[in-house]
Amino acid sequence: MKVIEMKNVDKIYGTVQALKSLNLEVEKGEIMGFIGPNGAGKTTATRILLGLLQSDSGESKVFGLDAFENAFEIHKKVAYVPGDVTLWPNLTGGEFIDLLGSLRGGLNRDKKEYLIKLFDFDPTKRCRTYSKGNRQKVALIAALASEAELYILDEPTSGLDPLMEMNFQKCIREAKEEGKTVLLSSHILAEVEKLCDRVSIIRHGEIVETGSIDELRHLTRLSLEVIVEKDADKFSHPRIHDFNIVDNKLHFQVEGKDLNEVLSELNKYKIVSLISKPPTLEELFMHHYGDDLSA
Amino acid sequence: MHRFKGTFLLVKSNLRRDGLRLAIWLGGLTILSLALMSAYATMMDEEALKEIIIMRASNPAIRMLDSPSPGLSLGGFYTARSSVLMTILIIAMTIQTMNKHTRENEETGVSDLVSSTMVGRYAPLTAAIIVTLLANIFMIFATTFVLYAYDLDLLYSFYTGVSFSLMGIFMIGVMAIAVQISQTTSGASKIGWLTTLFFFTISALGNLLGDFNPETFKVASHNITFLSPFGWYQQMAVFHENNMYLIVPFLVSFVILSCIGYKLINKRDVGHGLIPDKSGRKDAHKNLLSPLGLWRNLGRKTFILWLIIIGAFGLLFGYVSDEFEEGLAEIEGLEYIFGDISSTDYFLAMIISIVVICLLFFYINSLLRLRREEVDGTIENILASGVTRSKLMAMKILDATFDLFVLIILLVVTIYIGAIGQAEVSFLTMLEAGVSNAFAIMTVGALVVFAIGLIPKLASAFAYLMMLIAIGLGPVFGPMFNIDEWFYNLSPFSHVRTPLEDFVILPYLIMSVIIIIAVTIGFNYYKKRNLELN
């Protein structure tokens, strides 16, 4: 069953096209990573899913219901953590967590206490005194302590320290075990790589790649480190990239589809050892955004 | 001296950042003092002056709110009559300005950045003091100019200006300490206002316990008044005794208070106060846990402040209600035909209309909070939970309207209580005046709801324009501008029944229709539009 379904969604702000025929699907019980740099359209997409913004065209469904028309019904089953958490300065963190929980239709008290301890959070302080990380904890605890079925998290850990980030990952895994669905928008790639079942990469308002990290790896280059018996300096092949030789070791990258062809050419030089490394998510990401950087 | 390094740069940047707000304050205060002076100067010849001084100074209750009359002169009367208002407003400007350039910078984190640069530890406080001092010095010359323009003695006019601004300068010293003690802007303001209230009460008691001499037209206050800076400036008795040596306690206390402020800077950390922020509740009270509860909670402080102001107004007006009857003959020889309603009732009903129009500000600001929370982004949290937009908006309207009626009823009740033993007043006449004006207020409010739904980006500008039209073209100010009847009719307040007219239902029906249509459109668009989030 599809929990989130966006089809050909467009969103235009004045002259800026924020989303361009965006397609996104998230299955029940799945943790979906939603990655892309600042300004790629992640927040716009999540706000459309929450019915805070209306798309200009296309279809956005959550739990099979229209995201804008049925926002109220949907929100009963959704917990959201915004990227930039704004709180009322005079309320305490504890009051805010209770308020959001209650407006969402209920809060698991035990879970709230557990999360407050886990995140080492002081709920008695006024919100104006919290740092960015602590403001995020308020929203995270409120979301995770709710009985929601879908968590929409928009860069939830950008202000957390590494220890708290580990606790966050623990919570998300627990949520998955309970059968909950998570849409995790982030640009902390290591986090997405550790947590997510599938990843969608968004660029200029379009999804450029979707799939499990393994699937995505096949679509990109492998890094190879090879030692050959003879004439290492004579080796070359039109399908290899970033080629160099250090201490008689050949280093290069090759697309998955060209691997066979390159290996048979290498065989002529008698392979002594070969180490192949799968690309990290960061390399995948750079693969899609490389032109932006060089531009 | 390195501790003061960068002061000059900070003064320049403070003035640039805050120039507009200060200009509005200073311009407004100057215009106000001009308006007061022109009212006194044109309304009164010497006989009338004598009469009004006797009337005000012989009443102990009024003596509490006036500065003691120094003798018979227009200048003397001006200081007696308007110095309390002017000094309180100057204090308000001082508290706000000191806060803005010290506490507020620490709260928003600006001072972290500033402190990390080549700026001395004492520079931010010094810059705030200098800027506030400049504003107060400007007011000395503005007051001098206003009084001198009405042919009063130049030197005495200058003394008057000095006496008013010295109160501001005293408060600079108080605030230099307050912003070190409290960790929040509102906390520092509270310390400033409590100090003001404390000293004002002492001087008011001194004046209450004093004596009025009808021969010399002078009020001799009780000596306890010298315990209060309000007493110091009031006892200068400008235009008569001119006790300018009383500048000394002002300057001494300013220096001592500021020095304490500087000392305290060394005892605390940037961004923190000497008194740490109190811990609050770990869990929310159950009353907070609904959209209505949230709106009540967010507006509570403002509402309490209005309750105090309106309650005090009501008691005061009730208490002086018998003076209205006497004062009636004074006003440009107008004669009213009162029918079956007493002149006091008529005047109190008029007073209620004026105060209720002030409540328009409260109501509109309360409604605009819906839009402000949208801009600030706090509303995103709420609307992403199980709350519909219609409910959020409906609860805001309910919240604001409830407060409005509580304030109107409080005003009527406090006037009634204050008037016990003074004048005979009819509770019903006053209540009717309050409620029929509330109709006009809600009409403007409905248009604001319409704007929040339909033209969110322009909503607050639109709201203030509506407010300006409703008040400016309405019955209180409209007649002053000699405008066409057509314009006059634009203000809903022009269609509210005054106590002398017969009741006509049509205007109320029209207002109800406008309210229903505007609110319905507002709701429909608010439900359907994109949130204007950052």
Image (spheres, helix red, strand yellow):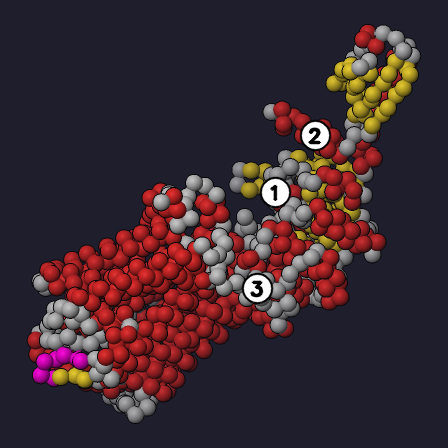
The numbered dot on residue A91 is 3
The residue that disc 2 covers is A286
Q: Which residue is mark 1?
A: A11
Q: Residue A138's spot in the image, x, y percent?
A: 64, 57
Q: Which residues are magenta?
A: B214-220
Amino acid at circle 1: Lys
Badge 2 element: helix
Image: A134 above or below B39: above
Viewer-nearest residue: B175 or A114: B175
Other-residue count near label 3 (Cα within 10 Å), few / some / many at <14 / 14–19 / ≥20: many
| In the image: residue B143, left or right of residue A142 | left
Q: Are marks 1 and 2 in contact (CB under 8 Å)?
A: no
Please report, as a chain letter, where disc 3 is located: A
What distance separates the C-alpha of mark 1 from that of mark 3?
35 Å
Label 2: few (<14), some (14–19) or many (≥20) C-alpha neighbours in 10 Å: few
- Disc number lying in front (2 or 3): 3
Q: Quadrant of residue A215?
A: top right
Nearer the observer, B75 or A199: B75
